[in-house]
Image (spheres, rainbow, N blue to C red):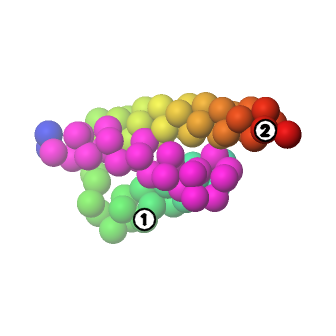
């Protein structure tokens, strides 16, 4: 249970940031990560509410960091022109 909570706290945040970096769109990164979480719930890898809550919190934090990263990249690109 502890390992599932730690993984739920780290990986969704990382995945949102990673997918946002690859696609250059934080919403698509969030949707892809949510799809992976839904697939893992469907397969039965996560079954408890605390894991769902930690997943949601990690998704929110990852979305915030991805939004900040994209905003900084756009500002940096605008400064170069």
Which residue, given by chain and number where applicable, does mark 2 sit on?
80
In the image: residue 73, left or right of residue 43:
right
Quote the CA–CA distance across marks 2 and 1. Answer: 41 Å
Q: Residue 6 location, x and y as percent?
A: 23, 40
Earlier along the polypeptide chain: callout 2 or callout 1? 1
Outermost residue toward the right? 81
Badge 1: residue crowd in 10 Å (few <14, some 14–19, many ≥20): few
Q: Residue lying farthest bottom? A: 43
Q: Residues within 10 Å of mark 2 (few under 14, many from 20)?
A: few
- In reply to whether residue 36 is colored magenta, the answer given is no
Examine the rendering and report whether any part of residue 21 can be seen: yes
The numbered disc on residue 8 is: none
- Tell me the quarter of the image containing the N terminus: top left
Q: Is residue 39 left or right of residue 81?
A: left
- Please name the residue shown 26% across and 46% down the image: 7
Residue 48 x/y as whole percent: 27, 44
Q: Is residue 11 magenta?
A: yes
On the image, the x and y values in percent for residue 49 come to 32, 39
| Residue 23, quarter of picture | bottom right
Report x, y in % for residue 8: 31, 44
Q: Quadrant of residue 50?
A: top left
Residue bearing mark 1: 39
**Residue drawn 15% across and 45% down?**
3
Main SS, magenta residues: helix
Residue ID at (41%, 46%): 14
Q: Secondary structure at mark 1?
A: helix
Q: Is residue 46 above or below residue 65?
A: below
Please provide the residue range marked out in magenta. Answer: 3-26
């Amino acid at each position: 249970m502890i390992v599932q909570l730690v993984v739920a706290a780290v990986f969704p945040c990382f995945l949102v940031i990673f997918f946002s970096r690859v696609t250059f769109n934080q919403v698509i990164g969030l949707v892809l990560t949510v799809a992976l979480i839904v697939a893992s719930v469907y397969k039965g890898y996560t079954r408890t509410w605390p894991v769902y809550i930690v997943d949601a919190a990690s998704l929110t934090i990852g979305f915030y960091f991805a939004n900040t990263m994209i905003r900084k990249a756009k500002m940096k690109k605008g400064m170069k022109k």
